[in-house]
Image (cartoon, rainbow, N blue to C red):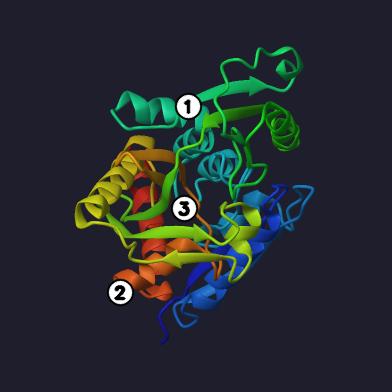
Amino acid sequence: MKPHKVRVALLVGGPSSEHDVSLASGRLVHASLDKDRYDIIPVLVNRKGEWPVEPKHLKDMADVVFVAMHGEYGEDGTVQELLRDLEIPYTGSDHMASALAMNKILSRRLFKAHGMNVPHSVVFNSHESAERDWSDISLPAVVKPFNRGSSLGVGIARTIDEVKLALERAFSYSKRALIEEYIQGRELACGVVDDGMGHAFPLPVTEIIPKSGFFDYNAKYTKGATDKVTPARILERETGLAQAVALRAHELVGASGVSKTDMILGEDGDLYVLELNTIPGMTENSLVPQAALAHGITLEELFDRIIEAAFIKHAASARR
């Protein structure tokens, strides 16, 4: 008798501005999972947020949901809270950790409170920007929506007029935006993988070198637009610091399964935390798959670990 296959509902798409990235992540997950071990059931939520099946039926269709939805709705805790209420095991962080990580304002306060360096930033609301006093803005500055991923709506401004234009772009994605100091240095990213019970380890650090000079959406997902060096060509102590910071950020947020922390190694030698992603991209151009391979973990093994962590986390939650 053949062993029972694990039924995996692969959740992709959604109304997020990162819909297309989610589809690309889903394709890599689908291609990498062992078809002899898993029965994969794609579940594509359309751009209007409409599901192909009632979510409550997922429990009858699948043993676990692999969440490969990025950005708002899929990564901000909305889907996680829905699946929790339906008592369906799902991959990644719970709804509270997801919401916290997605909110750059709150997560940075948390990191700073625990002694991490974060760029100085000013919060702007869309309704007040026109009347704002601009004297406290240092240039150049980075402007970004407070709760989006994939560098959507992010730009560098070198004049106040450019700041205002960048704010308009950021406000098209969110009602609040951050204007933060531009830190000259090397952009780093470090993934963390755990088993669903808090036993976590960092992946090799990646240095990101966009050929355009800025790691925006196109630089992230256009093949050949960015050099991504894993392991990063930095000092051993800098590697250790970046991995320790990523691990600590993962723990502070309460992330589960896998996360990725973005950082800047400043020219002053200090390491600055930019953000933590609870559902990092899993496309062929994404950083976590590259780092896993550099660590000696195949993509099949990586996704196995993420799924196993989902079952462990769900079992632990059910006992509480």
Q: CA distance from mark 1 to mark 2?
A: 34 Å
Q: Earlier in the sequence, mark 3 or mark 1?
A: 3
Tag 1: Cα neighbours inside 10 Å, few (<14), some, or many (≥20)? some
Tag 2: Cα neighbours inside 10 Å, few (<14), some, or many (≥20)? few
> Label 3, on which residue?
89
> Label 2, on which residue?
296
Left or right, residue 8 beside residue 143: left
Say which element carries label 3.
loop
Nearest the viewer among 201 and 156 is 156
What amino acid is at disc 2? Gly
Residue 87 sits above or below residue 34 on the image: above
Give the residue displayed 36% in from the left and 64% down from the top: 305
> Label 1, on which residue?
106
Give the residue displayed 75% in from the left and 33% down from the top: 165
What amino acid is at disc 1? Leu
Give the residue displayed 32% in from the left and 60% down from the top: 203
The x and y percentages for residue 312 are: 34, 54
Nearest the viewer among 26 and 309 is 26
Q: State which mark lies toward you, 2 or 3.
A: 2
Say which element carries label 2.
loop
